[in-house]
Image: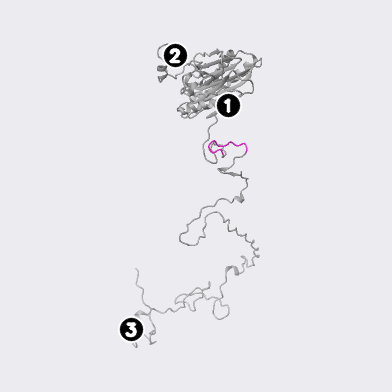
Amino acid sequence: MSQMPQQAAVSKCPSCEEPLESGDRFCGACGYDLSAVPARPDDSPTIAMSGSVPAPSSPPDGVDWPVARDSDGSGRPAPVHAAAEVPGTDSGGSPLPPTPPAAPPMPAAPPESPAPGVRFDRPDRPGEPEEYPLQAPDPRLATEPQAPAGPAGPAPAAGAKVCVACRAGRVDDDGYCENCGHAQPRERDHMEQESGPVAAVSDRGLRHHRNEDAFSVGCTALPDGTPATVAIVCDGVSSATRPDDASLAASRAAGESLLTALPRGTHPQQAMHDAILAASHAVNALADEPATAREQAPHQNAPACTLVGAVVASGLLVVGWVGDSRVYWVPVDRSTPPARLTEDDSWAAQMVAAGLMSEAEAYADERAHAITGWLGADAYELEPHTASFKPDRPGVVVVCTDGLWNYAESAEEMAEAMPLDAAARPLHSARVLVGHALDGGGHDNVTVALLPFPAPPQGAGSA
């Protein structure tokens, strides 16, 4: 068990130096209180000074300490040396080879460019943070040349795609501006094309997540040298598989067919009929998927789209369509009436044709836009519609999807939405019509192509 420490005996009174006996609590000569005096140690204290530790002059009782080696024969220990001052020897007692001189120290970094990172030698000063933020790399150490910076950031390199929002930043591979971070529109979200006097604009709209419309425009010449212009507009059926692929394939196939047949002397109405058949074959080919794809999605239907087109050549206006996209005629002289040149392949059109409902009632029904004709492998028997007209005055042919005519359904409404100079500025007017649909709500994809009638000479275009 633990014991209380006991006071050591005192041989002489610390006050009068009188001898004391063991067990005395007071000095017999002077009456000094001996209990307040600590025992005097027999050995000398060990105090470390300058790294040397002197050995005690005499060992404590009961301990056999080794005697320190004398250096001068007086009993004092040899001086203590630092490890670097004592020559080293190997295991056999031979001196070690001399250590090669150390490399010269690296020059210190200039004060204005301290080493990046966290400081660990921070002085203990109140109010200073425990860590310092990592510093940016020194621009003087950059290895790649940087483009000169503009007001909105680094200028994009020559030929790089420029942001549509800030018009200053470069667009990276994932479709975002490196300057402002704005997401860029996909290629088909907004498309514009002008080919001679014919122009077209297509926009995704405000509600759809992608643009399922497509168009093809072009100009050529008949065998006698007279100009001919062509426009094809296709609308993908959203309830079908890959409607965007279907509209793109149909528009390209029909446009190429027309631009190939007309210079050969094919009658424009026959060329339009053949173009619709070529578009149908192109869409049907999209359904020829591998058996594995059909097994993974057995309930998907085939890609499908609608088509409408127009050809202006040699004083003749030819239109063709399958589905509910339309063609309008708007004369330059707005005092004469405009006209709609196509009939929809839709439930509403059938109700009106059968006399079961008025046009206003039919198109107000929720089933109005259910189409009864389309291009696709699972379509009913294909019946391309074509018609020819010989306008007696100049005008503009409007070829559009329902994304536009939903906001300008009648011919009078379409004429009112179109700028007066549409024949001279077709691309500008197509943009205006697309904007009219977007201002109205933009619930669907919007695509419109404009063809002035008669076709201007080759080389003429919008101002």
Numbered disc total: 3
304 left or right of 267 in image? left
User: Overall secondary structure of the magenta stretch?
Assistant: loop
How far is disc 3 from disc 2 in space, using C-alphas? Answer: 135 Å
Q: Report x, y in % for residue 18.
A: 38, 87
Residue designated by label 3 = 26
- Specify the quadrant that holds the C terminus: top right
User: Callout 3: 10 Å neighbours few (<14), some, many (20+)?
Assistant: some
Q: Which residue is mark 1?
A: 193
Q: Work out whether mark 3 precedes mark 1 in sequence or the reverse, and give the earlier one.
A: 3
User: Residue 290 at what x, y percent from top left?
Assistant: 54, 23
Q: On the image, numbered disc 2 is attached to which residue?
A: 350
**Quadrant in the rendering for residue 428:** top right
Residue 41: percent from left, percent from top? 43, 78
| Residue at the top extreme of this rendering | 354
The secondary element bearing badge 3 is classed as loop
Dot 2 amino acid type:
Gln
The answer to whether residue 233 is left or right of residue 41 is right
Query: 361 or 272: nearer the eye?
Result: 361
Report the front residue among 176 and 101: 176
- Which residue lies at the image location 40% right of the left edge and 17% below the top edge? 361
Q: Reply above or below: 143 against 210.
A: below
Location of the N terminus (image quadrant): bottom left
Helix, strand or loop at mark 2: helix
Question: Mark 3–mark 1 contact, CB under 8 Å?
Answer: no
